[in-house]
Amino acid sequence: MEKQINPKRYSVIREKNPREIVMLRGSGCKWKRCRFCDYHLDSSSDEQENYELNKKELMKITGVYGKLEIINSGSFCDLDEQTIRKIIEVCKEKEIAEVHFECHWIHRKEVEAFRRRFQKEGIVLKLKIGVETFDHYMRQDILCKGMAEDDPAVIASYFDEACFLFGLPGQTKESMQQDIETGLAHFERICLNIMVENSTDIKPDPGVIRVFEKELFPVYKDNPRVDILLDNTDFGVGGEQDDE
Ligand code: SF4
């Protein structure tokens, strides 16, 4: 039987682009093949159950910063329609004018209509894509990211923000810095995720992580356009909880 997870799903990010964040549950990532990822297990095909769970989390939103980030271990289009309606309702009620969603490359053509839907409600969307690295071989052949497009300008024509995955065997100070600088040149904001050991066969490289922490973290830690997650629960969501 698949392991049921009970993560913390609501948090407030108080530094750098302050915003509330909720981790909702959808029908599941339609790609599911990224070799470093096991969090796509947070999904269910029962739309009503997902909605009930999502509604409970969305009710915690206060609108304190007027900005909200929604993650759902997949893409925005994996969320059910009732949940989307609830998000819009909560945003209007709490005067939230900016919402961030994540999305895989395979859904890029669905982004525009989704943006327009929210725009009509006075809400600006920021779409975040997991690029992981601009190194084609590593992204496609090692990580199996499913994004053959290499041109950052083309990727940025659909998406506003990009995530990168660092701390992997073969990465160097130069390769990571090049990804960061290319990301900053093309996207409004970037998020650097340091690989954390999970159930997949992609393992973090402690030597590469040390290089990142020593050489790059001090350079970018105060950059307001760069989020850095040394641990994947640093945004306050995703870690297991036993209450509820
Ligand atoms: S697209 Fe995201 S959720 Fe889907 S497998 Fe890749 S990293 Fe995991």
Image: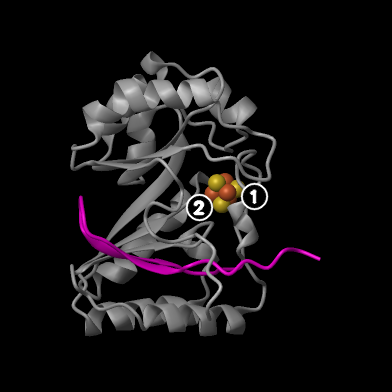
Where are the magenta residues, as a range?
Answer: 1-27
User: Would you say 26 lies left or right of 103 here?
Assistant: right
Residue 209: mark:
none
User: Residue under circle 1?
Assistant: 32
What's the amino acid at mark 2?
His
Is the shortest distance between ligand 1 and the CB of mark 1 under 8 Å?
A: yes
User: x and y percent of residue 238 in the render?
Assistant: 49, 60
- Mark nearest the camera among 1 and 2 is 1
Query: Mark 2 or mark 1, which is nearer the start of the sequence?
Result: 1
Find residue 223 and report its image quarter. top left
Is 163 covered by the magenta stretch?
no
The total number of labels drawn is 2
Whether residue 157 appears in this view of the structure is no
Is 151 drawn above or below residue 38 in the view shown? above
Q: How far apart are marks 1 and 2 (CA)?
A: 13 Å
User: Residue under circle 2?
Assistant: 107
> At x 21% / y 72%, what residue is drawn?
96
Is 44 drawn above or below residue 193 in the view shown? below
User: Would you say 68 lies left or right of 237 here?
Assistant: left
> Which residue is nearer to you in this view: 194 or 107?
194
> At x 54% / y 31%, what residue is drawn?
148
